[in-house]
Amino acid sequence: DIQMTQSPSSLSASVGDRVTITCRASQSISSFLNWYQQKPGKAPKLLIYAASSLQSGVPSRFSGGGSGTDFTLTISSLQPEDFATYYCQQSYSTPVTFGQGTRLEIK
Amino acid sequence: EVQLVESGGGLVKPGGSLRLSCAASGFTFSTYSMNWVRQAPGKGLEWVSSISSSSRYISYADSMKGRFTISRDNAKNSLYLQMNSLRADDTAVYYCARGKSGGDYVHAYWGQGTLVTVSS
């Protein structure tokens, strides 16, 4: 199985900050990497697919990068509604696997 | 508008069975792969199973193989998850999710989830 490791596990930041979350795969997954945002009590929401493609309706302050084993999710200027938990997911092969999550909190 | 509505969750005893359903609308159900993903209380996301648009390709997480069965009825725009031999660690919110394109594992749309509690 492909293991996905996110860092950091939690992060405190302020509105307006630039934030980067990283995700590492245990083997190459090309660009089959997706990012999701989840708020408490809600279903996850797809933000980025294929490592760097922005899902329709997602603000352009979100961006993704990387390929192979190392990936990033960057929020260019944090907004109050961005405080949530973020998950990476590999869709290269089954079993599909998620990272453990990064909880983004208000400083 | 894409809508996915799960149902069938509830309280079940260890060793029991439950069948989850997911009613889909707002898109051509028969042309998309579908998935189940679960989340234990306070924990992260865990992929459960996927089924291709025609049901030809089915896959499961190892811990669910032999106990869970995914299926779909394209005529009824519905996805199902039959769960047998349930254990306490199956307690979770179960989400159905639609693939982004015809046959991928990108979970582009999610339902609101249904809670399954396995407890005596």
Image (spheres, coloured by chain):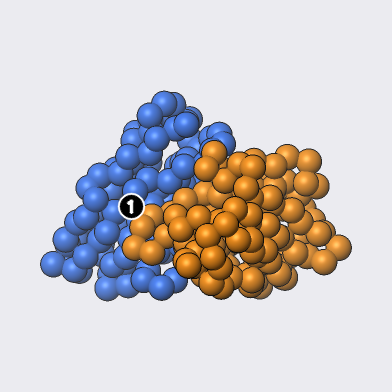
Chain colours: A blue, B orange
Question: In the orientation shown, which residue stands out farthest toward the top?
Answer: A27
> Can you give x and y, in whole percent of width and height, for residue A82 in the image?
31, 67
Question: In the orientation shown, which residue stands out farthest toward the right?
Answer: B75
In the image, what residue occupies the spot 19% across and 56% down? A11
In the image, what residue occupies the spot 34% across and 63% down? B42
Quarter the C terminus of chain A occupies: bottom left
Q: Is residue A5 left or right of residue A29?
A: left
In the image, what residue occupies the spot 21% across and 55% down? A10
Residue labelled with disc 1: A101
Question: In the orientation shown, which residue stands out farthest toward the front?
Answer: B120
Instruction: Choose between A69 and A58: the one closer to the eye.
Output: A69
What's the amino acid at mark 1?
A: Gly
> Can you give x and y, in whole percent of width and height, for residue B11 in the image?
53, 72
Rendered image quadrant of residue A18: bottom left
| Crowd rating for badge 1 (residues with CA inside 10 Å; few <14, some 14–19, many 20+) | many
Rendered image quadrant of residue B8: bottom right
Instruction: Choose between A106 and A93: the one closer to the eye.
Output: A93
> Can you give x and y, in whole percent of width and height, for residue B72 in the image?
76, 56
> Can you give x and y, in whole percent of width and height, for residue A83 in the image?
28, 67
- Residue B116 visible? The answer is no
In the image, what residue occupies the spot 68% across and 57% down? B82
Q: Is residue B31 left or right of residue B67?
A: right
